[in-house]
Image (cartoon, grey):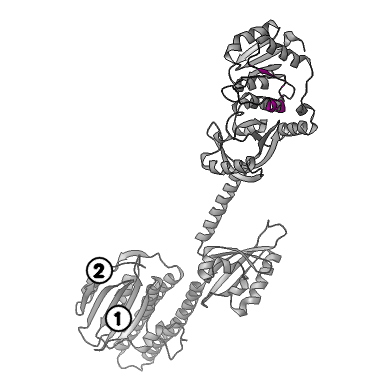
Amino acid sequence: MSEDRSRIALVAVPERLDEQLAAALRDAGFDVTTVDSARACLRLVARDGIDGVVSGDEPPDMDGIRLLRSIRMSQPTLPFVLVFEESSSADASEAVAAGVSECVSATADALTITSRLRDAIDVERQSPWFTDEHQRRYRHLVEMAPVPINLFDDTGESIWCNDATLELLGLDGRDEFVGRSIFEFIHPDDHDVAQRELADVIERKESVGPTHMRLRRPDGEVRHVQISTAVGRLLGEDIGQAVVVDVTPLREVQHSLREERRFVQEALDTLQDVFYVVDADGDLLRWNEAATEVTGYDDDELASMNIAALCIETDVPRILESVETALDEGGDTIEATLVSKRGRNCPYEFRGRRLNGAGDAARVVGIGRDISHRKERKRQLQVLEQWLRHNIRNDVNVIHGTAKDIRRGRVDDVTESAGRIERYADHLLEQADRQRRIVEILTTPPDSATVDLSNLVERAVCSLRTRYPAAEIELVRADPVVVSVMPDLTAAVDELVENAVSYADCASPTITISVVDDGGRAVVRIADDGPGIPDIERDTLRLDREIDQLHHGSGLGLLFVYWVTRLSGGDVSITENDAGGTTVTLAFPVDGA
């Protein structure tokens, strides 16, 4: 390389030599660029803009030997002359180990330093670093590695980094990173972890990681990384070698998956129905909160259970057969009795479907729905139908028999017999209307409404007093209490009072009504002084009793009251009064109790 083409960087040489040395170098035919910092020198090296370096041993941003080590990673043969101050703590042997071309005392004159630089340029002088094949390969590996690699000293200052590190940190050049503490780029919350790892590597000579940390780029962006750090030795100095894997995209995907899983799980937990996934043997793999609430088993218990263990013993073969059918045919639906941990039985409908996309694993996903209300409605409608069949037959038989007697002339008073036919016909129409409403509330229950029960009863009492002026209807207590009930509750109260008036054995019956806030319940009591409700009418509420021609009530009033109360979440009870008469009690849960 000819002198007239040699470009020299003059870096922070002692002030007394600065002008003399620059002039001497130019006189010797060198093109001189003076810079006042090591980073500025590194920028020139990165642009391949110089053919040699003359540096003082104490640039303001890093010492001369660190600058040398950083340059040697990318420019192992670049001539580098280090000018030592007599007071410097730098060690010439350390500089030689780092690959310095020449070491010159700052007391030397400018011509001597220029001569040493010329020798470094014109004469092949290679340190062991340049001929060591292992270190050459190491340098090449670090440069070409697709993952960020950073080399740092015992203080945590960066000695060198590859291009992948610069890309990760959003830096334009190595001069923006080399010589700076790695802690400038580590998130403050992770400094303690980084300090411990630095001590492990530099002081204890132990490799650590991979460890999760966060890096904060100069532009403020935070990247999540896994850092593996090992001890090493570079150009005569113990160093730390950090291999960094940017896991930010992975964490973003993991976060998205967690959010999606959380959303799906929350959606499943919102279901009132039991959700489940089982394998080919029926072993539970996944379930929602409804499954734990309904069965009474916690998650750990369910994780070791088979779906068949949640049903009564006689249903086990059918449950397992249904799982097999769902896998073979794509789906199956069965009814079975679910048994809770405490032994409570409840009829359930299980709809299972083969879970496609599960790879080689055979899976069935299903929904279990409580059908106890559906079965109860069905049974109630069956009882209602049976009840109507008997009572309609009875009324029609009376009408038909009376009409036949009139036609054959077997009655003494035709007018009275015709009136009897009218009364039974009116009763049939009344029962038909009542039956229609009962069927409506059983098949399509209306939404409950939030009301003050005392206000509802007060309005009903005012209306009843107008319709039955002869009766003494008294509201003896009206506690304000809020409940959610069906709109038909007013008609149910009317029904009870009308029955008390209709079946009274005196011209002026007395009916007392009270609304009581009984803590967690709102209680309506309707008491009369009449002859009492016949047992045959009370038995109408026993839905498990078979109805035959010898046992059936005469009307649907009590059934209507019963179902309105039950569908409002309440209970009905009938008791005899000590002084005669009957008390019907309706009890409802209080809102918020």
Magenta span of residues: 92-106
Q: Which image quadrant: the C terminus?
A: bottom left
Residue sitting nearer the eye, 298 or 126: 126
Q: Residue at x 66, y 13 (%)?
A: 108
Q: Residues within 10 Å of mark 2 (few under 14, many from 20)?
A: few
Q: Which image quadrant: the N terminus?
A: top right
Q: Residues within 10 Å of mark 1 (few under 14, many from 20)?
A: some
- Can you identify the residue that label 1 sits on? 499
Q: Secondary structure at mark 2?
A: helix
- 520 over 573 or under it: above or below: above
Residue sitting nearer the eye, 160 or 465: 160
The disc at residue 459 is 2
Q: Earlier in the sequence, mark 1 or mark 2?
A: 2
Q: Position of residue 148 (x, y in %)?
A: 66, 36
- 214 over 279 or under it: above or below: above
Residue sitting nearer the eye, 124 or 106: 106
